Image (spheres, coloured by chain):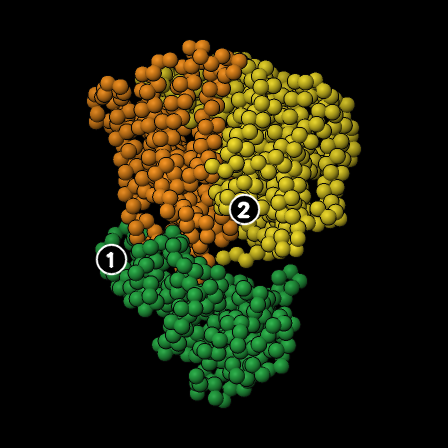
Amino acid sequence: MTTDAFDQVEPRPGSPKRDTILSVDGLVRRFGGITAVDVDHLEIQANAITGLIGPNGAGKTTFFNLITGFDEVTAGTFQFKGEPLEGVPAYKVARKGLVRTFQLTKALSKLSVIENMKLGAVGQVGENPFKALIRPIWGNQEREIEARADELLKRFKLYEKRDDYAGELSGGQRKLLEMARALMADPEVICLDEPMAGVNPALTQSLLQHVKELKDEGLTVVFVEHDMDVVRDISDWVVVMAEGSIIAEGSHASIGKNQAVIDAYLGTAHEIDLGTIELDPEKH
Amino acid sequence: MNWSIIIESTLEAMVTKNAVVFALAAIGLNIHYGYTGLLNFGQAGFMAAGAYGTGIAITQWGWTIGPAALFGIVLSVLLAFFLGLPTLRLRADYLAIVTIAAAEIIRRIVKSTQYSEVTGGSGGLNGIGRGFYDNNPIDSGLDLGIVSFSERELWFMVVGWGVVVLCMVLTYLLVRSPWGRVLKAIREDEDAVRSLGKNVTWYKMQSLILGGMFGALGGIMLTLEQQSVQPDQFFTPTTFFAFTALILGGAGRVFGPVVGSMLFWGIIQFTDVSLRQAIANDHIPTWLMDGVQAGQVRFIIAGGLLAALMIFRQQGLFGNKREVALDDH
Amino acid sequence: MPAAPRRLLLLLVALTSVLGFSFVGAGAASAQDATEEPGDPEATPEAEEAAEDESIASVVGSLKYDDEEDNEVPVEGVEISATGADGEEVAIDTTAEDGTFLLELPEPGEYTFTVNPDTIPDGISLRSEERGTTTFSLSPGQQRTVLFPLVEGEARERSSGSTKIAQVPQLAFEGFKFGLIIAMSAVGLSLIYGTTGLVNFAHGEVVTFGALLAYLFNVTFGLHLLIAGPIAVLLAGVFGGGFDRGFWRPLRNRGTSLIAMLVVSIGLSLVLRYIFLYQFGGRTRPFDQYAIQTDTIEFLNITMVRKDIWIVVVSIILLVLVALALGGTRIGKATRAVADNRDLAESSGIDVEKVILVVWAVGSGLAAVGGIFLGLTEQVSWQGGFQLLLLMFAGVTLGGLGTAYGALVGSIIVGLAVQLSTLVISSELKNVAALLILAFILLVRPQGILGRKERVG
């Protein structure tokens, strides 16, 4: 898959993009004495699928936490559509259109699948405690939301499970549910933290298809993944992190040949065959 | 052993004063713990806010019952704000620590001689809301054979259970709305809710306020029933009686706290009266237990019940096993 | 059912049998004390019932003061009078044995109520002279309670600014001593939280348990406190370890959630506390030795007795030993590792369950020391530990939940704050200061002074 958007982009860390939706400058996060994230500059291309890879402990999830407001930066700035986001609480980040999923799925176990989905919708009148008392006020909106949720559930092949508790789904189904629920929030950018982990291979293909469709619908996708097949299959652009910093950027083809990337991976793992198997043996 | 007395007082305890008061307190805790997952261990403080707010407004300022009760509820809202502000952003246990401490502090403040001009100190306030029984339209008692109620008791039961039903309806409407959905989601995983653009801290505050208001209503009903209020009625075990009642009946369901409160006071009264009967009839030797000690058994039962339920039957007596099984993930 | 309930039952039986029936004498005695079982929610003052049908107004009240142990002591034989608006005395009563009085007023209206200061016994005085009279109006049939606040010694509010400053060293010393007692009791609370994630609301009962064990060996069995104390501490440690082994570990293994365990600990706290009350009675009781020491020592404007010095010295030694053990020994380092990151510690070969067991045993032993010292300072009470619990929470949270050093620092700050706050607020309300500090620290630095910053929402 090639995209014109990246034709002119240099494959080096921090390279400017043609149409940047998210940009990061001097982003640092320290825990005690350990620096978990230290990113000089990064731009994310709008309406593209960007894969974020790197060995364990590279700071990928922390990076996600930072840009979605789930963690506080030690230093640095970042902008979403040109608007500064640092210090903005997570829920406001989500409302602005930057929505995430979690590495360890956060399907709400004791809510039914359809309730999980409906929760995702933003701007619900019935979420005000006073209006909540009077069903006619929110009933119509609820029906619209439910219709949209059913639509998505069918697309994600979860419709048959719609009235089950989310806690009764398999691990892969929960991943699907979480992604579908995030879509209910009408995001512009969706950050997927290991969307394929634990998903059974039969489901993987359809899940990948969904991710690609998101792009066709105009969304920007950023995802963390360990499975290089997946990365090669769907990403337009790959960003590699190691020890908190960005060490390489480029198409997956250029990344596979990048010496810095190979060294970074070799530092943590031995059975390495970039591009064929998973880069992260510890994940098993 | 006079079994008819035991049965009579047990049945009576299940429908009168304490059952009503603690049903309301537990309905509040149900909003907190059952639906939102908040650990409010200071419900007694909210009850005290309602009771003393009402009591002070009536006895000191000469207000009528309605506005006075409203004042008590306003106080409980302020208390919720004060407690929620520093704690709701934090992990669940901080709220537990701060609320249990706050409730104890409130009890000490109203008990202290320093403010006794307003609060009545350790003696509390008397002569609160005479209008409550003066307006009693019921002019004769009710004798059902096993149990009988005076017209005063009947009047309190009508009003008290009326308030309980109202609160249940309110809870029912709320938890089935999108608002209730957000609360239940917060109970499961607040980060997930945050990631979907909901202001979790603010919803928790709303929950704390609402549940605290129900608790205050419990305190108000207590005050009206006895026409007085004493500070030690709001000591820490009061909160845990309500908590035990809630878990017993089933947290996270509308009827849970009400059924739980009735059962709880039934159990407490049954053991209490049985023990006293047994002591009076020399079935229990006084070296093992005397009358004062019999009165302490209720606390041991309440605590033991709470611990046992949390270990073996978190869903309560009538809860849904399927939901609890989902916890193991 | 797994072995858990059987073990629990065994444990509780052991606990009650050791503690329980040896106090039978004490328990029986409690009946005559008409124990201060607080606030039976059912209790309705009979006076109120009596006033029900009368149209005249009345005023009731009781004269009491709180002694050093916070016990209410009624004052008998004090004259209280009511004067009408025209200056005529309309009622007079003298307080009864229980300190109560009742003034029946001929008609509604405004009255002034006055305590006759000459009838107040020596050694007790009104909190302030202005509070000896009060004026208010009564409506028909109304019964009001009026309180005249009494204090032991001279009226405190009379003291001027300069004498307040003079009190600072004394209060600071008492606060420091109290802080050390809180710290010792709280080390276990904090480390149990750090290693298991459990906020143990029954930790106050561990403190009480230690004091009661010491009382048992000291007063009931007649051993000298210097022997009874260490026995109690050792036994408390054994019980603490057994409690973890027989109760909490099975719960952890069952996968009981932390929140559920927290609520379980609340239930246990209630059970234990009232078993203590059941067996020990509601009165506070002194140990056989060191209860009263009269030969005071003056030092830098601080008046103290010998036991104060010993409490401070022994506490500091024990706390330094704890700090050294955490820093230097294998088990201490392992404890910190587990508190830091349980999974990491486990994968690096640390026997986490063993660490937790040790933490429970040592923490309970230290809590017992705290309980005994508390009993030496304030006498032994069935709820001494519970009253300390809120202050322990304040101290532990202040210092950083889960850290041992934090518990020390935070507790001492809380001890100082509680005592020094009596300079500006009534001593009845001194614990309020601790709560306010707690709320403030949660607002500005929720991880505590020494805690590491955790991500918060």
SS assignment at label 2: helix
* Mark pair 1, 2: CA separation: 41 Å
Between disc 1 and disc 2, the foreground one is 1
Residue that label 2 marks = C439
- Chain letter, green: A
Q: Quadrant of residue C281?
A: top right
Residue placed most toward the observer, B173 or A103: A103
Residue that label 1 marks = A139
Instruction: Report the residue at 38% width, 38% height from top.
Output: B316
Residue C333: horizontal and vertical position, in percent? Answer: 70, 50
Hue of chain C? yellow
Q: Where is A270 relative to B221, above or below? A: below
Chain letter for mark 2: C
Hue of chain B? orange
At label 1, the amino acid type is Gly
Residue B112: horizontal and vertical position, in percent? Answer: 52, 30
Chain letter for mark 1: A
